[in-house]
Amino acid sequence: MNLGPLIVLLRLFEGGKVSPTVTGPPTPEDKNPQNVDFKPLCGPGHYAYKDPLSKKWSCLVIPKGR
């Protein structure tokens, strides 16, 4: 007899502890981060640029406001 589904149902009815309430990564506080180790998701009007010397990523303004 498989008790796995029964355990999941019991936990669900205990208090909803089966899945987290918040899904996905937290939203970044700064929409255009500077000098970070990973490639950032830049806001509108900006693009990600990796400095070849420091190997850090930054969000720069798109020239001529594309």
Image: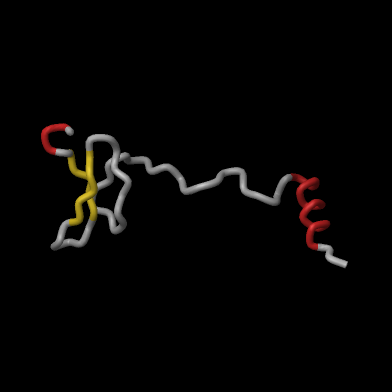
- From the top left corner, tell me how far across and down residue 36 is, in percent: 27, 54
Residue that extends furthest to the left in the rendered view of this protein: 64
Please name the colour scheme applied to the rendered image: secondary structure
Residue that extends furthest to the top in the rendered view of this protein: 65
Residue 20 higher or lower than 43, as above or below: below
- From the top left corner, tell me how far across and down residue 52 is, in percent: 15, 61
Q: Residue at x 82, y 52 (%)?
A: 10
Residue that extends furthest to the bottom in the rendered view of this protein: 1
Instruction: Locate residue 5 relative to residue 56 in the image: left or right.
Output: right
Residue 37 higher or lower than 13, as above or below: below
* Number of numbered labels in the structure image: 0
- From the top left corner, tell me how far across and down residue 17 is, in percent: 70, 49
Instruction: Locate residue 52 relative to residue 34 in the image: left or right.
Output: left
Q: Could you say which quadrant of the image residue 4 lies in?
A: bottom right
Q: Could you say which quadrant of the image residue 61 lies in?
A: top left
Residue 55 higher or lower than 25, as above or below: below
Dividing the image into 4 quarters, which one contains the C terminus? top left
- From the top left corner, tell me how far across and down residue 51 is, in percent: 16, 57
Q: Residue at x 31, y 57 (%)?
A: 38
Q: Residue at x 32, y 41 (%)?
A: 30
Q: Residue at x 23, y 54 (%)?
A: 57
Q: Could you say which quadrant of the image residue 1 lies in?
A: bottom right
